[in-house]
Image (tube, helix red, strand yellow):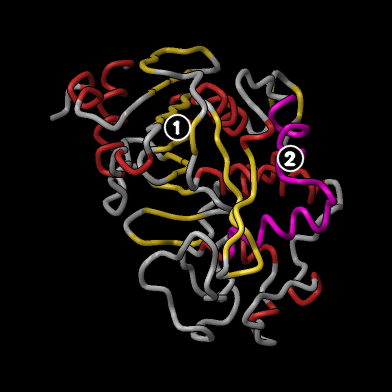
Amino acid sequence: MDDLDTLLAAGGSTALLAARDGRVVFERGHHAHRSSVASVRKSLIGILYGIAIEAGEIDLNATLEDLGINDLSPLTPAEKQAAIADLLKSRSGIYHPCVYGMEPGRPARGSHPPGTFWYYNNWDFNVLGTIYQQETSRTLAEAFQKFVAEPLEMQDFAAEDIFDVPGPESRHPVYKMRLSGRDLARVGHLFLKGGLWEQRRIVPEQWVRDSTKAWSDLGGGRGYGYLWWTAEANAPGDSLSTEWPITYASGAGGQYIIVIEALDLVVVHRAADVRNGITHARMGEILRALLRVIG
C-alpha cells in the first residue's frame, strides 16, 4: 500500500502538510485544528532552552545538585551530578518514577552514571520543564508565546494550550502542549533555516546544529540529539528514513515535524486522536509516498 491517497484514507491521519522553502506544496486535512502534539512537546521546549542558554539565564553544564533539583524519592549523590546537557540528550542516568509513565525497559536506578547511557526517559523531559521555569521565572506558556509563537506569527496558538499536569509519582509535572499543523510547520521551517525566521534570528544557529546532531548513536543509522531525532539516508534502523538524511520531532500516534534539508522541505503530520493515530512505520510509508507525489 504505497499510494498516498490510499494511505491517508486508511485512518488515523487528520492533516498532512509539506512546505518547500516556506511555500506549501501539498496539504490535506485540518491544518488549523489544535490538538495534542504528544512528545513533539519535548523538541519544542528545546527551542526555549537554546534561547535561554544564549541569554545566560541557564547554564547547560549546571548539575541537578547545582540547581537544587530533587524528587519524592531522594536523588542519590551520583544522580545529582547529571547536568542539563544530559537531560537534553536523555542520558541523565536517573531512572525515577515520573508523571505520565515511562517507556518499557526502564533500567534499574544506579545502573548507569549520568551521561553514559541513552534511554528515552520522561523523567528527564519533565524535569527540564521544572528547571526552565525555576531558572527563568517564566511559565512555559509565557515563554513559548513570547519567544516562539509571536516571532513566528503563529496563526492558531493559544497560551492556555500549554499547561502542567501533576501526578503522585513525582514532584515534577508533565507539561502538555496543543498546537495546529500549520503552526508546527513554522517550527520546522525555523529549523530548516538554522534558527532564522524571515531573516530574523530567533534561535542561535549553533543550538539548531547541536539539537539536530546525533549525540547518541541508537544503531541502524538512527540517532538522538537535544530532544530531536535523526536518521541517516536509507537508515535500516528507522522506518521513517528516506533517500536523504532527516531530522524530526516525533509524538505518539502520528505527530511529526520532519525536516529534509537536502530537499529544502518541511513535512508535518497530525493525528488528532493520539490513541487511534498511526504507527511510525505507517508514517514512513506516507512520507515516502508524499515525496514521490511532490517530486
What residue sits right under mark 2 in the picture? 204
Residue range corresponding to the magenta coloring: 124-150
Membership of 146 in magenta stretch: yes
Q: Label 1, secondary structure: give it.
A: strand
Label 1 is placed on what type of residue? Answer: Ile
Magenta stretch, main secondary structure, is helix
Asked if 114 appears above or below 3 in the picture, the reply is below
Q: Considering the image in quadrants, where does the C terminus appear?
A: top left
- Say if 177 sits above or below 8 in the image: below
Helix, strand or loop at label 2? It is loop
Q: Which residue appears farthest toward the front when viewing the image?
A: 168
User: What residue does disc 1 label?
Assistant: 260
> Magenta stretch containing residue 250, yes or no?
no
| Nearest to the observer: residue 31 or residue 62 | 31
- Quick one: label 2, few (<14), some, or many (20+) residues within 10 Å? some
Labels 1 and 2 touching (C-beta < 8 A): no
138 sits left or right of 44 in the view: right
Q: Position of residue 84 (x, y in %)?
A: 69, 64
